Amino acid sequence: GMPVCFMARHLLILLILHCSHDARSRCGLVRIGAAVSLSRNWQNSGFFQGEPAASAPPSSMPTLALAGDAVSMTRNMQNAGGFEGLHMMPMPAALAGDAVSFAHSMQTGFEGQPFASAPFTGVQSPVAAMLPAFFPTSPAFAPAPAAMQPQAPAASPHEPAPPTPIVLPIVQPGECSCEPAPPVCHVSKLAVREDHAGPIGMTLFDVTSLYGTDILSELQTEQVQMALVSETSFMCLDDRVEEPSLGTPGGDLGEFVLALSSYLQERGQGRIDGPNFTQSEVDSIFEEYLESLPASRPLVHCTDDASLRHLQDELPVEDLDLRRPPDHAKELGLLQKLTEVNNHGDSHVRLMLDKPEWFQLQENLVPMVLTSYYTNLWRQYQDSSSPLYTIPKLRLNILSGHRDPKAFFEVSSGGFCHKQGLAPLLTPRHRGNEKSVLVSHLDAVSLRRQEHAAFFRTIANLGPRKIDVERLHQRLDRHGWLALETTGSQMASGLPFYTLMYS
């Protein structure tokens, strides 16, 4: 509070004046940082009571270092030889990083000598004369012999209990124990570039008004969240997504299809006219991939309520829960129906099912991956013996409403944030805002593809034919560009394109 701060500040001023007043003293004020905490602990501890301290020749006056932490202060006092003729004992407890430990160590560390009402000199100096007024005596501590073990100081009834001491490493003179904290990515600027104007949708003025440009306002800064790509799922490329997210065509499942296809091509099996991969092989790789995922980053697949209604009408089944379908729905061929184009609400998945050759995919690859996905999804929600039942790794996102994007955004972060593996999350659709957008994170998804390349290298190492991680990563990026261009041209035809760079 203000009285304590006022007293601490005046105490320091008096100390400085006293050091200047006595020409024989060698006081030095090294660094002021925790005077309030120290004075409060001294007050609570009742240091300024008891018998006068022994006086000493003026030449033994110590260098008093009012340091910003207990470690520096204790060490300076210890190096100076203590308080006027009182020799300090080894004080390991005083090397803790707070004023509480420092104060307690001072109480027990001076070879049983109690503190005087004027601890800094043997005579009543101007400082000593002021101390009783600043620090009234308190029974919190009584003079203790040196052999007594240290005990925690009692808390004042008018003050909160002191915090638990934080022990800091012992630092030798001339050394520094402070390691600079790694720099943190804080978004404060946005650069917006219009790559392609469209006859409909959002204008450049609309984009900068909503999302900002150059220095961001507080509200605009709150619209973007930075997230670690390694800990974040990828959502599908759809303007109906209503949560802060990273976006890529097909979401996580679309990226897995891309990675699996590129891996097979590296092995000479993924060509359109090449040998077919079997369902059991896809199942094995898919399940192994799920095991490698952190539980905080489930694999995302999107569909929508319109395709779900279509599926119910085809079976027919009422109130179908795709996560927990009843047995009779499975018996009616639900799994097979989920590999058909019209029963999917993700535009990218629909295109891969309908036109696999546009994406350089084998015709049966996407249906096999979807079969693996839904088989494991049902285990996750219905099979208590499955590891997925305990630790879910799959997420089905059912989108609502109709698509109506007003622009296409390619979003990235500056080099500094990107090197830290961070990317900006944006929300494609805000409720109450008619200007929904398609959001792609091409830079961020390249980091995920690097992870996929490393995973498939591990798979390849189980066989005789190895693969190069960097080469596979480059293939994944090229394949991803093709997928984005193909799907984007269908979903965003006529829309303006903008690049948003956060830094």
Image (tube, rainbow, N blue to C red):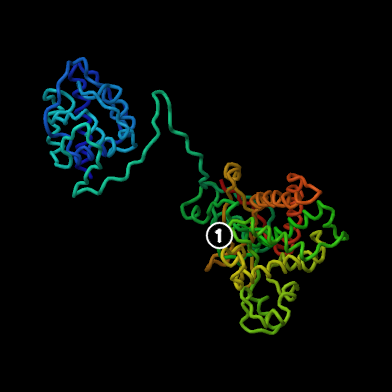
Q: Is residue 411 above or below residue 36?
A: below
Residue 13 placement: quadrant: top left
Please indicate, yes or no, whether residue 435 appears anywhere in the rendered image: no
Residue 397 is situated, as x and y percent measured from the top left of the image, at: 61, 68
Tally of numbered tags: 1
Q: Residue furthest right?
A: 273
Q: Nearer the viewer, residue 22 or 466?
A: 466
Residue 197 placement (x, y as % from top left) = 68, 56
Kind of residue sitting beneath label 1 = Pro
Look at the image and tell me whether residue 405 can be seen.
yes
> What's the residue at 81%, 51% (across, down)?
266
- Residue that appears at 62% across and 53% down: 411
Q: Mark 1 falls on what kind of element?
A: loop
Instruction: Indicate whether 49 appears above or below 340.
Output: above
Which x, y percent locates residue 322? 64, 75
Identify the residue at horizontal 66%, vertical 77% (top origin): 308
Residue 410 falls in image quadrant? bottom right
